[in-house]
Image (cartoon, rainbow, N blue to C red):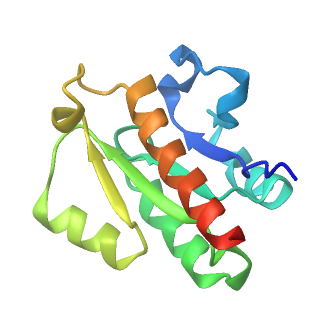
Amino acid sequence: MRISPKPLLVVSQNATNINISAKKNAICIVERNRIFPSIHELQPDGIILDHDYLGTDAEKILRRITSNPFYSKIKIYCYKSRPHTKVDGLLAALGVQQFIYAETIQQPKGTITGKLLNYVMETVVATTLADAG
């Protein structure tokens, strides 16, 4: 029996620059109005929100995700160029489970890299396998 992990949804303006192999199972969304239809259609295990791209819309998106029980099992990751105590605290209270900073992954400001996706995909796949077992 082969377990296929659910997709990982990436919301970023720079997502088109990411080279993802077909086996990684990541779906990139650039248009903000496609976020919730994509979540509903794909039912992903996780979502990466690029805070630098979404800005204040990130808060609205998080409030909508956390207020709807349909989205309760989605793991939420937030990519940011740098930490900010007040903003990060609010986003964590709204449901962000992990922050990924550009400084941490040592890449140019404002980009999401293949390393980031590999890390998150490994986390999602490991959780899926643990839940299945």
Vertical order, 24 against 18 (above or below)? below
Residue at the spot x=43%, y=73% of the render?
A: 95
> Picture coordinates of residue 11 (x, y %)?
56, 41
Front residue of 100/130: it is 130
Look at 32% across and 71% down and name the residue there.
92
Left or right, residue 29 beside residue 111: right
Left or right? Give the position of 73 relative to 57: right
Taking depth in this image into account, of 24 and 89 the one nearest to the observer is 24
Q: Residue at x 22, y 63 (%)?
A: 87
Q: At 57% across and 15% down in the image, what residue appears?
A: 19
Quadrant (top left, top right, bottom left, bottom right) of the C terminus: bottom right
Q: Residue furthest left?
A: 85
88 vs 83: above or below: below
Out of 133 and 102, give the one closest to the viewer: 133
Tell me where residue 109 appears, x and y as whole percent. Answer: 24, 25
How far across and down, in percent of the image, does residue 13 sit?
51, 28
Residue 32 image-quadrant placement: top right
Q: How many numbered callouts? A: 0
Left or right of 84, for residue 9: right
Instruction: Say if 126 sits above or below 90 in the image.
Output: above
Q: Is residue 112 visible?
A: no
Residue 53 seen in the current view? yes
Where's residue 131, x and y in %? 65, 72
